[in-house]
């Protein structure tokens, strides 16, 4: 019995011990599972964070690779950073060049806070348009220009702002060291470095635009383009013309110098002009200064005018060339001509018969009309056509104006055209035609690029006889010494020429008290090498109070030749000329 009880207690103790062991094992197992689950959760969290970081890193890498592609896709203009060649004058002086710049853009998809971005950019970028910039930053596009052509300091200041989604793109900016000096010749470009006017536009028309489109000019060093102009001479001409416009209280003025042997344009200016570095001026209210943009208008080649009595040069040359008159001829200028309800008078008539030199010296409308009547309507029109005065000028300069003439020439048209009313031509082509009268009778289309004498000979076209050219040199010299050309005379440089005072056409009518004045000159008259033509539009005053060409346009010629002749290599000669007036050998 006692032994049974002992065994029973021993069994109960064993069972209790087994239960305790089971509980202990269960507790240990639970802890193991919990630790395992915790490790799994940590691993999952780590994996999630790694995935997030990998995704962010991959996106940043993608942005890094695609940045240049996005930046190059603005407006479909992939090659906006294309280079342009330098432009230099005939002596290698710089007229236009490219500067490396940067422009500011944004990827709106990466902008975190558009309001904050605009506020910070306004601290650096002057005159920023808040509403427009905010609209761009909130757009759904991948690229928006914010500001073109920033300075390096502005770029550094914007970088310091640390704005996401903001970047810079390298670009070119055209720079014109001379400012307005040769603006109407050189022209200007737009913000994408594409030529808009002058020789800049000409370069694009000659294939530069195609090279840009094909990407062959990106950051490529192109050979400089040399022009025919002399920057020293150009600067003097502009200075004289600008002073004349101010001193004579005129609306506008201009001048051009041609080499009669090659047709090269050595200088050409028209004022008002503009600074090609700033072709459009923005007013404080953000609008464009329209008055400033009027300076784009080039009155020498892009406008036509009735050139007044300068046309008498061509009328007398026509009569001489056709054999209708000689220098010894006399025409009756004793009374006005009445024709078709019009009366043609001389400004300061002598009321007597005049020799041909006197017709030129006294600028007789009556005498010139008589010469035109001798030749006839058809012959008159054909002669002016031969001199290139009735057709559009052929030259590199874009935008050259087309002359105007009557649809049907009648006798009254021929008479008035003989003294410069009824036909409107550009001042440039008037100078070109005058060069043909001086150089032995050869018409040369003008050029703004260098041209040798040999090249000129191959392009020259005879339009008048050698004898006619010699006679016209005599008339120019005669008028320079005895007539209205005396105001253009420069001692030692033997200047000849012809004035032209025309009533200005306003709204289809002639204004009696408003003139358009011109003077076409040649020098040195023993063997003319250069043509200089000046114009002045609506002067209110002039030398000694006069408003005619003799008091305004002629003094401009004098001031120009006095300063440029030494630069052009023309040596002064004092006293009587030792040599006869020579022909240019072609």
Image: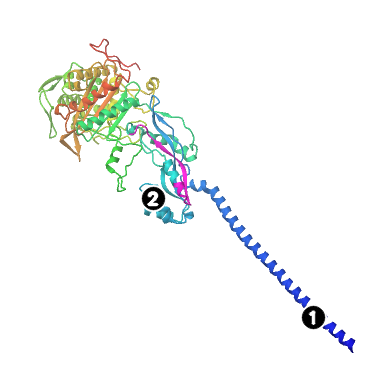
- Residue name at image x 19 percent, y 39 percent: 506
Is 221 placed left or right of 279 in the picture? right
**Residue placed furthest toward the top:** 578
Residue 445 makes an appearance in the image = no
Q: Is 82 within the magenta?
A: no
Q: Which residue is mark 1?
A: 16
Q: Dot 2: what SS? A: helix
Residue 582 makes an appearance in the image = yes
Q: CA distance from mark 2 to mark 1?
A: 84 Å
Query: Height in image: 226 above or below 490?
Result: below
Q: Nearer the viewer, mark 2 or mark 1?
A: 1
| Tag 2 and tag 1, C-beta contact below 8 Å | no
Residue 571's x, y, as percent?
A: 30, 15
Question: Image quarter for residue 14?
Answer: bottom right
**Residue placed furthest toward the bottom:** 1
Q: Which residues are magenta?
A: 158-179
Residue 454's x, y, as percent?
A: 40, 20
- Residue name at image x 40 percent, y 55 percent: 135
Query: Height in image: 139 above or below 579?
Result: below
- Tell me the quadrant of the picture where the C terminus can be found: top left
Of the numbered discs 2 and 1, the one sitting upstream in the chain is 1
Q: Which residue is mark 2?
A: 122
Nearest to the observer: residue 268 or residue 404: 268
Question: Image quarter for residue 482?
Answer: top left
């Amino acid at each position: 019995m006692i032994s049974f009880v002992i065994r029973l207690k021993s069994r109960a103790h064993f069972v209790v011990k087994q239960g305790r062991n089971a509980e202990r094992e269960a507790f240990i197992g639970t802890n193991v599972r919990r630790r395992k689950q915790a490790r799994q959760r940590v691993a999952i969290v780590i994996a999630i964070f790694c995935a997030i970081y990998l995704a962010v890193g991959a996106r940043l890498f993608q942005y890094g690779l695609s940045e240049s592609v996005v930046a190059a896709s603005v407006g479909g203009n992939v090659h906006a950073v294309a280079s342009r060649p330098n432009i230099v004058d005939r002596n290698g002086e710089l007229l236009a060049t490219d500067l490396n710049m940067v422009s500011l853009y944004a990827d709106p998809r990466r902008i975190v806070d558009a309001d904050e971005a605009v506020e910070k950019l306004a601290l650096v970028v002057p005159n920023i348009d808040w509403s427009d910039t905010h609209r761009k930053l909130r757009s759904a596009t991948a690229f928006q220009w914010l500001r073109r052509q920033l300075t390096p300091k502005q770029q550094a200041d914007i970088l310091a702002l640390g704005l996401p989604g903001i970047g810079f793109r390298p670009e070119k900016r055209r720079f014109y060291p001379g400012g307005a000096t040769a603006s109407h010749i050189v022209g200007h470009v737009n913000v994408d470095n594409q030529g808009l006017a002058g020789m800049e536009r000409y370069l694009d028309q000659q294939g530069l635009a195609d090279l840009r489109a094909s990407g062959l000019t990106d950051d490529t060093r192109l050979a400089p383009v040399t022009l025919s102009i002399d920057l020293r001479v150009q600067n003097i001409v502009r200075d004289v013309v600008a002073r004349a416009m101010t001193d004579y209280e005129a609306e506008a003025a201009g001048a051009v110098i041609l080499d009669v042997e090659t047709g090269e344009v050595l200088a050409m200016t028209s004022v008002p002009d503009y600074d090609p570095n700033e072709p459009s001026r923005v007013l404080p209210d953000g609008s464009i200064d329209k008055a400033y943009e009027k300076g784009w208008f080039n009155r020498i080649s892009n406008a036509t005018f009735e050139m007044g009595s300068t046309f008498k040069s061509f009328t007398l040359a026509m009569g001489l060339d056709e054999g209708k008159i000689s220098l010894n001829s006399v025409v009756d200028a004793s009374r006005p001509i009445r024709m078709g309800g019009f009366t043609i008078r001389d400004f300061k008539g002598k009321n007597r018969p005049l020799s041909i030199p006197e017709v030129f010296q006294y600028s007789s409308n009556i005498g010139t009309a008589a010469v035109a009547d001798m030749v006839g309507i058809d012959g008159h029109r054909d002669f002016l056509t031969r001199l290139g005065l009735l057709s559009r000028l052929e030259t590199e300069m874009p935008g050259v104006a087309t002359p105007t003439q009557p649809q049907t020439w009648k006798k009254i048209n021929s008479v008035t055209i003989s003294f410069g009313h009824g036909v409107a031509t550009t001042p440039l082509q008037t100078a070109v035609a005058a060069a043909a009268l001086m150089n032995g009778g050869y018409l040369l289309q003008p050029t703004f690029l260098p041209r040798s004498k040999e090249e000129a000979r191959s392009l020259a076209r005879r339009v008048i006889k050698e004898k006619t050219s010699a006679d016209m040199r005599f008339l120019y010299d005669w008028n320079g010494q005895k007539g209205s050309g005396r105001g253009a005379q420069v001692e030692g440089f033997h200047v000849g020429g012809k004035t032209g005072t025309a009533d200005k056409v306003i709204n289809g009518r002639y204004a009696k008290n408003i003139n358009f004045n011109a003077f076409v000159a040649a020098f040195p008259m023993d063997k003319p090498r250069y043509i200089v033509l000046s114009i002045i539009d609506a002067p209110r005053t002039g030398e000694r109070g006069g408003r005619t060409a003799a008091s305004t346009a002629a003094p401009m010629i004098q001031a120009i030749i006095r300063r440029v002749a030494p630069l052009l290599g023309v040596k002064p000669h004092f006293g009587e000329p030792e040599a006869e007036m020579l022909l240019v050998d072609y």
